[in-house]
Image (cartoon, helix red, strand yellow):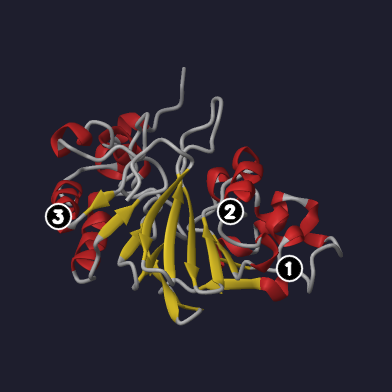
């Protein structure tokens, strides 16, 4: 497993099935964000490709592994700009199907007029896969990608994606951390919590929802949790450290009261 500060990091590779993270494509003032590629034989899917800041460097990196115009899926966990705003370009320049929550799918045309353009092969509605709230199974080569419900963590229509071959849970904003080097391993978990606490307290809905999510993950066979920002949690022990910490964290509406809702004088 590569731990250098290059743009790509191989998370899993058995010769046929690969998972690759791109960790340092955002330059300038943009928030650090990870983008992901899953390959199964000749099939390929991109997860949370980002916006204009990442589109060009990401396509250059992807071309080292796959032919861009042969992507099967472009998959979005939720609707944030650092997740999905490059979607019109993927529709125009690839033949990939777009996978997104049914709650956000029909908002996609607001991103760009390209959605109504005849440049989109087959029309964008025909290339859209709308995920129901309970998630679902996405056929992918000789395997599947599982869309796992993660609503209100932090978006109202939010999914995470589980790869049963690598046993990686691509967790979106859950587990996100603010770090200088997303490839550096977590050595001291307690110290790492200081890089997560503020983000989760504001962006996650409530401890009640988090506990539902933790219960679900504990029933899954997960070897790695890889968030969209920051450092992954690798191995059962580190994952359990994270689950134990996050299930006790008060956040979101737990921390608000009437003083948070007053009209300014």
The residue under the point 47% across, 63% down is 38
Q: Secondary structure at mark 1?
A: loop
Between the C-alphas of marks 2 and 3, the distance is: 34 Å
Determine if residue 85 is in view: no
Place of residue 244 in the rendered image (x, y in percent of width and height, measured from the top left) = 13, 51
Place of residue 183 in the rendered image (x, y in percent of width and height, measured from the top left) = 35, 40
Between the C-alphas of marks 2 and 1, the distance is: 27 Å
Q: Which mark is residue 124?
A: 1
Which callout, 1 or 3, points at the residue further toward the start of the chain?
1
Determine if residue 7 is in view: yes
Q: Nearer the viewer, residue 143 or 176?
A: 143
Q: Which residue is mark 2?
A: 64
Place of residue 59 in the rendered image (x, y in percent of width and height, measured from the top left) = 63, 50
Q: Secondary structure at mark 2?
A: loop
Q: Marks 2 and 3: which is nearer the front?
A: 2
Place of residue 103 in the rendered image (x, y in percent of width and height, measured from the top left) = 54, 64
Q: Which residue is mark 3?
A: 240
Q: Nearer the viewer, residue 83 or 25?
A: 25
Q: Which mark is residue 115?
A: none
Q: Marks 2 and 1: which is nearer the front?
A: 2
User: Label 2: how many residues lie within 10 Å, few (<14), some (14-19) or many (20+)?
Assistant: few
The residue under the point 26% across, 37% down is 255
């Amino acid at each position: 497993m590569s731990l250098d500060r290059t743009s790509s990091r191989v998370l899993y590779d058995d010769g046929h099935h690969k998972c690759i993270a791109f960790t340092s494509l955002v330059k300038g003032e943009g928030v650090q964000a990870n983008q992901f590629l899953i390959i199964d034989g000749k099939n390929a899917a991109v997860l949370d490709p980002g916006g204009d800041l990442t589109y060009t460097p990401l396509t250059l990196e992807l071309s080292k592994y796959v032919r861009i115009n042969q992507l099967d899926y472009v998959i979005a966990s939720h609707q944030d700009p650092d997740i999905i705003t490059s979607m019109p370009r993927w529709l125009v320049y690839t033949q990939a199907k777009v996978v997104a929550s049914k709650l956000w799918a029909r908002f996609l045309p607001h991103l760009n007029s390209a959605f109504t353009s005849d440049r989109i092969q087959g029309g964008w509605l025909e290339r859209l896969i709308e995920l129901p709230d309970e998630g679902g199974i996405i056929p992918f080569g000789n395997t599947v990608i599982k869309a796992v419900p993660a609503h209100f963590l932090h978006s109202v229509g939010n999914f995470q994606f589980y790869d049963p071959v690598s046993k990686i849970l691509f967790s979106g904003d859950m587990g996100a951390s603010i770090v200088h080097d997303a490839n550096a391993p977590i050595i001291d978990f307690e110290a790492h919590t200081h890089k997560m606490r503020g983000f989760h307290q504001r962006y996650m809905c409530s401890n009640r929802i988090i506990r539902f999510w933790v219960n679900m993950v504990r029933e899954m066979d997960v070897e790695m949790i890889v968030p969209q920002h920051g450092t992954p949690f690798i191995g059962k022990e580190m994952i359990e450290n994270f689950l134990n910490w996050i299930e006790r964290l008060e956040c979101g509406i737990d921390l608000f009261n009437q003083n948070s809702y007053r009209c300014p004088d």
